[in-house]
Image (spheres, rainbow, N blue to C red):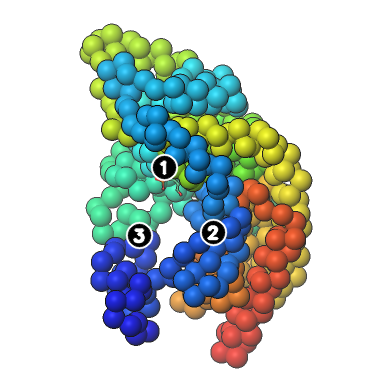
Amino acid sequence: MTYIPNSIEARDIASLVHMQTNLRKHQTEGPLVITRGEGCRIFDNAGRDYIEAVAGLWCAALGFGSERLAKIAYEQMRSLGYYHLYRHRSNEPVIELAEKLIEIAPVPMARAIFQCSGSEANDTAIKLAWYYWHAQGQSQRTKVIARHMAYHGNTCAAVSLSGKPDMHAGFGLPFANFKHTEFPHYYRRHEPGESEEEFSTRMAEALDSLIQAEGPETIAAFFAEPVMGAGGAITPPAGYFAKVQAVLKKYDILFVADEVICGFARTGEIWGCQTYGIEPDMISSAKALSAAMQPISAVLINERVHKAMLEQSDRFGNFAHGYTYAGHPVAAAVALEVQKIYAEIDIVARAKRLGPVLQSALGRFRDHPIVGDVRGTGLILGMELMRDKAKRLPFDPALGVGTRAGAAAQRHGLILRVVGDRLVFAPPLIIEAQEIEEIADRLGRALDDVAGELEREGRR
Ligand SMILES: Cc1ncc(COP(=O)(O)O)c(C=O)c1O
């Protein structure tokens, strides 16, 4: 593609580094420049509309523009545009937001600590796990376990926690004390005849074996997303979290639930922890916390962790941790208003009502010739593209079938997320039933295009 000099695309290519992007390809292909958003739709600079079926990066829960939230940010900037939480300083919006989060937490939580992103939330939770064990006189508990294909962010520690080899390659990561156990992708990885419960038992046994091999006395914490998002919208199979939690309890290992995607009704309850009976010691949240209108994240900590923090603070005279913008009053005011909107529109009831609509509209594609499986919960869903669904045979990865489907969807005005040959959907939580039908309609045309293309190439 050749762009006119000084066009917005040419200026992008000449000035920006894009994340999670093939940088060389970007030099020739250039960007998709989004200029405007309205509800679940975004518009590019040529005026084309797209339904955003993954809420940007799973975060724009209330869609892509809001007069009401703009006014809140404006008013807050006028009255107090910045103040921090260091050295006993505080501000009103962040106090109210902390109270709100503690009130709606899925299990009793003692305090909220703020950051600006999901990665920073997980970094904070990792540090707090280490801090906790230092306070217990068990400073040898330095290892942290997460799952293969987990995504917990991209700061050095959060990406080490993540189990995605593509994000470690070339960076010399993960750090040595981050370990990864099996991930519960039942559809792809179950043995013939193995039930979900049996598969979950195998997953929990694999975790137990890893803990044994590393030495239980060296493990500080286990991190898990209730539904694995960037790993492909992988919902846990039956019994999974009950069995995993039993293993963690046996060795007294802290459990951190990464609710960065699941938090605030994505799975049909406020928290994924409620959907799956998870009782964590800490929760990291971000994204829908502010409906992505401001960068803010929070870690909720239980009394056990908080008590240890008080003891450490006594010992060292200070809780020596923080970020300049943590607890930013503008971000907090917007997040607080977002929480009010969620209550007004009863976001949980909405997700409960529209979740089944999404699951059934996209579930129809189970019969499509290149779709092997469709699985999700609430307003998150993963669709596996397979060469032979009866035999569960995948496509040759070199064919890039998932990428083709993503590109075809974009041509038909649909933005979705591609993870290998898995298509992922997590639309804004304000989506309406007829927009879900539009997603299904545009997706159907995209899948037919790809199936036809593969047929012509003799790949099916
Ligand atoms: C489950 C999960 N945790 C953490 C993160 C990192 O959040 P951020 O990109 O805000 O740093 C993400 C981002 O997608 C995520 O999906």
Examine the rendering and report whether any part of residue 100 can be seen.
Answer: yes
Kind of residue at disc 2: Gly
Q: Nearer the viewer, residue 371 or 12?
A: 12
Answer yes or no: disc 1 within 8 Å of ligand 1.
yes
Q: Which amino acid type corresponds to the residue marked 1 in the rendered image?
A: Pro
Q: How many marks?
A: 3
Q: Where 271 sits versus 183, above or below?
A: above
Secondary element at tag 1:
loop
> Residue at horizontal 29%, vertical 22%?
86
Percent coordinates x, y for residue 196 in the rendering: 68, 47
Q: Label 3 amino acid?
A: Met
Q: Nearest to the eye among marks 3 and 1: give it.
A: 1
- Along the viewing direction, whichever of 150 and 215 lies nearer the viewer: 150
Which residue is pictured at 64% across the width and 48% down the height? 429
Instruction: Please state, as top left, top right, bottom left or bottom right, where the N terminus lies in the image.
Output: bottom left
Q: Earlier in the sequence, mark 1 or mark 2?
A: 2
Dot 2 falls on a residue whose secondary structure is strand
Residue under numbered circle 3: 19
Q: Which percent across, then down, holds residue 380?
A: 63, 51
Nearest-to-viewer mark from 1 and 2 = 2
Disc 2: which residue: 37
Lower position in the chain sequence, tag 3 or tag 2 = 3
Between the residue at mark 1 and the residue at mark 2, the CA separation in whole angstroms equals: 18 Å
Q: Quadrant of residue 27?
A: bottom left
Of marks 3 and 2, the one in the foreground: 2
